[in-house]
Image (spheres, helix red, strand yellow):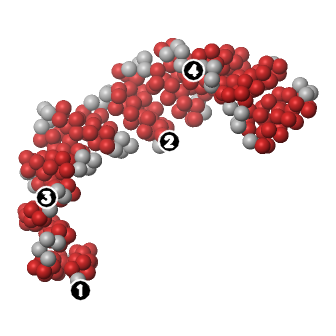
Amino acid sequence: MNVVEKHQKAREYLAQGKMDRAIALCHQIIEVKPDFIPAYQTVGNALEIQGNLKAAINWYFKALKIQPNLAELYKMIGNLYSRQKQWDEAIFSYQKAIKLQPNLTEVYENLGDIFRQRYQDNLTAALSHYRQAIDYDPQNESNYHKILETQPYHPEICCRLANILFRKNKLSSAIIFYQIALITEPENPEIHFNLGKILTEQGDIQQAIYEYQLALEIEKNNPEIYLNLGIVLAKKERWSEAIASYRRTIEINPKLDLAYNYLGEALTKVGELEEAIYVFEQAINLNPTSPLFHKNLGDALAKQGKIDEASVAYSRFIEC
């Protein structure tokens, strides 16, 4: 067998729990090829499994003498020092690891854990490392929870965690963290807006209307909030209020094609077909490839008895 095949066999021994055989075979490999780094790592792995952490660290350091830029090895050494509560050595190893490879998220988390465990009065250092972990892996919920363990009402962290939970469709949990954020930031329009969207998805339309209205009290010229408010008002068949909300959306942002479409739908519901046709045409001018806009225009024209024009609109609906 060549060196690679022998090492593969050593890894098989390791997986089978035959540590002594794995170590012996790696020694043979090193005698033939002293710079074969994987053999040193496998010896270290075997010794670590046997509980001989000090010897495992020594073998990892032997590998680093040959190839000093292996961030993963420094991380492994840091883990072993941490298990032995040798905090200074662990910190030094982890810092070497992230200097070589800054995107090692786990290392920032481990450093945060060390500072938090060892220096309860130095939360700034711990929080800084958790934040760096978040920067490199913003979708990992655990790092947000770690910060909130020490700063439970931090509005930014609560909001960012709630946003992640919202995107993952964990709606009930997202609501909890938005509500916690509101304790310290009751006038944050983004929180009220997101709560409105979640409540809409959950079917709590009345409460969603309330949250959108709160958002608009704070941020009076946000077209997206007005648009969403109009949508939920329409769900409650509060047509005049929905129409007013859509009109305000268009006043603020006359390029928002969906606002024209929703306005046209609401006008159609209340029988204002002439204006509905006009605003559907405005929506199509802004977005001529939307099949929905052409269909809605066709429906309004058909209700007016303009069959030929409706046929043209339906033809364009089919073509889109």
Provide the secondary structure element on which disc 4 rests.
helix
Mark 3 touching mark 1, by CB under 8 A?
A: no
Provide the secondary structure element on which disc 1 rests.
loop
- Which residue in the protein does label 2 denote? 169
- Residue 1, disc: 1
Answer few, some or many: residues within 10 Å of disc 3's Cα (few below 14, many 20 plus, some between 14 and 19).
Answer: few
- Which residue in the protein does label 3 denote? 68
Mark 2 touching mark 3, by CB under 8 A?
A: no
- Marks 2 and 3 sit apart, C-alpha to C-alpha, by 44 Å
- Marks 1 and 2 sit apart, C-alpha to C-alpha, by 53 Å
Residue ID at (78%, 32%): 296
Mark 4 touching mark 3, by CB under 8 A?
A: no
Dot 4 amino acid type: Pro
- Marks 4 and 3 sit apart, C-alpha to C-alpha, by 56 Å
Relative image position of residue 79 (x, y in whole percent): 17, 55
- Residue 223, disc: 4
Relative image position of residue 273 (x, y in whole percent): 82, 21
Foreground disc of the pair 4, 2: 4
Foreground disc of the pair 2, 3: 3
Dot 3 amino acid type: Pro
- Marks 4 and 2 sit apart, C-alpha to C-alpha, by 25 Å
Foreground disc of the pair 4, 1: 1
Dot 2 amino acid type: Asn
- Marks 4 and 1 sit apart, C-alpha to C-alpha, by 71 Å
